[in-house]
Amino acid sequence: MPLGVGEGGLAFALNCGGPAYMLPFERLIDDIGPRLVQVAAAIRRQMGME
């Protein structure tokens, strides 16, 4: 999940990885991905960017 910070163009990435037997593709798409989106939004809110 990209996380742009400030107007200076700083960019960070939030990600999740692990062994395929613990993180099948469907779980990444249906569960982990949406959670990363929520975390990025929470960080932006805490920084006063939203």
Image: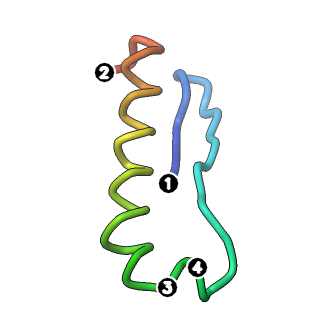
Residue 47, horizontal then vertical, whole percent = 47, 14
Q: Is residue 25 above or below residue 8?
A: below
Nearest the viewer among 30 and 10 is 30
Of marks 2 and 4, the one in the foreground:
4
- Image spot of residue 13 (x, y percent): 61, 49
Give the amino acid type for the residue marked by disc 2 in the picture: Glu
Q: How many marks?
A: 4
What residue sits right under mark 3 in the picture?
A: 24
Tell me the element at label 3.
loop
- N-terminal of the two: label 3 or label 1? 1
> In front: mark 2 or mark 3?
3
Q: Residue at x 68, y 72 (%)?
A: 18
> Label 1 sits on what residue type?
Met
- Amino acid type at circle 3 is Pro
* Residue topped by disc 1: 1
Q: Give how far apart the Cα atoms at labels 3 and 1 are.
A: 18 Å
In this view, the mark in front (3 or 1): 3
- Where is mark 4, residue-wise? 22
In this rendering, the label closer to the viewer, 3 or 4? 4
Give the Cα distance between marks 2 and 4.
33 Å
Of callouts 2 and 1, the N-terminal one: 1
Task: Measuring from the top left, give residue 37's x and y in whole percent.
Answer: 37, 48
Numbered label attached to residue 50: 2
Q: Residue furthest front?
A: 22
Secondary structure beneath dot 1 equals loop
Q: 10 or 44: which is nearer to us? A: 44
Element on which disc 4 rests: loop
Q: CA distance from mark 3 to mark 4?
A: 6 Å
Mark 4 residue type: Met
Residue 40 percent coordinates (x, y): 44, 38
Dot 1 or dot 4: first in sequence order is: 1
Front tag of 1 and 4: 4
